[in-house]
């Protein structure tokens, strides 16, 4: 398998459907861990000045983006969608021709998987942060991650991704990244 390197000028962060009502269906401990990692990814992306895109699946039914995630995002405009895949025109345009996409969100076996598959089909390279994705059931999450890998995604963690993008402890963003992943 060829080696890979995450590159700041080639990557965006995509936050898929981390919504209030959907979060309410998750196991509390797993949800808290996932929200912590999603927020670390957002803080890291902001520190590295990466584009951050956010989707909401049918917000009328599933509610808005979770309040803890909203707080980290600041001023943002989520892309509303009805398709399970987040590869809707507004998201594809928002990727700014960056072919690497760091993916976090919910649910692993539905929207995250279908997004990954669609990204690969469109020539993107998705990187799924396994510690920042969640499904209601552990088996669905596990199989969803396997399906993402089979579809062509690389699996990594938020911390792995951010420090790979950082490259050195001498980088000016080092302290912000270190604080984000704590």
Image: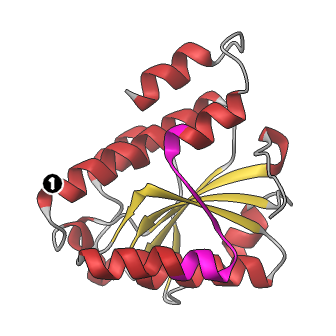
Left or right, 63 with reference to 181: left
Q: Is residue 91 above or below residue 37?
A: below
In the image, taking residue 117 as reference, residue 159 lies left or right, namely left
**Residue farthest to the front?**
1
Q: Is residue 168 visible?
A: yes
Q: Residue at the left extreme?
A: 28
Label 1 sits on a secondary structure element that is helix
Q: Nearer the viewer, residue 122 or 158?
A: 158
Residue 150 percent across, percent down from the top left: 62, 82
Q: Which residues are magenta?
A: 147-159
User: Which x, y percent locates residue 131?
Assistant: 41, 54
The one of 17 and 171 positioned closer to us in this rendering:
171
Q: Quadrant of the C terminus?
A: top left
Q: Which residue is mark 1?
A: 29
| Vertical position of residue 26 compared to residue 48: above or below | below
Q: How is the image coloured?
A: secondary structure
* Side of 108 where 94 appears, left or right: right
Label 1 Cα neighbours within 10 Å, binned few <14 / some 14-19 / many ≥20:
few
Residue 16 position, x and y percent, is 48, 67
Residue at image location 22% in from the left, 58% down from the top: 30
- Residue shown at 45% from the left, 28% from the top: 180
Q: Does the magenta portion include 155?
A: yes
Q: Residue at x 70, y 35 (%)?
A: 165
Residue at (16%, 68%) from the top-left corner? Answer: 24
* The N terminus, quarter of image: bottom right
Viewer-nearest residue: 101 or 92: 101
Q: Is residue 57 visible?
A: no
Question: Splitting the image into 4 quarters, where does residue 72 fall?
Answer: top left
């Amino acid at each position: 398998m060829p080696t890979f390197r995450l590159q700041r000028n080639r990557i965006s962060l995509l936050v898929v459907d981390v919504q209030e009502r959907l979060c309410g269906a998750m196991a509390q401990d797993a949800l808290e861990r996932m929200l912590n990692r999603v927020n670390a990814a957002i803080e890291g992306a902001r520190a590295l000045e990466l584009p951050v895109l956010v989707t909401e699946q049918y917000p009328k039914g599933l509610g808005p983006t979770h309040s803890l995630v909203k707080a980290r995002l600041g001023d943002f405009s989520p892309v509303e969608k009805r398709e399970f895949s987040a590869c809707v025109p507004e998201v594809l345009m928002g990727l700014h021709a960056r072919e690497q996409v760091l993916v976090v969100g919910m649910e692993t076996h539905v929207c995250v998987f279908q997004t990954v598959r669609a990204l690969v089909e469109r020539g993107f390279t998705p990187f799924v942060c396994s510690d920042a994705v969640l499904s209601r059931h552990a088996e669905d999450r596990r199989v969803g991650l396997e399906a993402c890998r089979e579809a062509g995604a690389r699996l990594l963690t938020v911390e792995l991704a951010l420090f790979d993008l950082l490259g050195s402890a001498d980088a000016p963003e080092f302290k912000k990244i270190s604080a984000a992943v704590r």
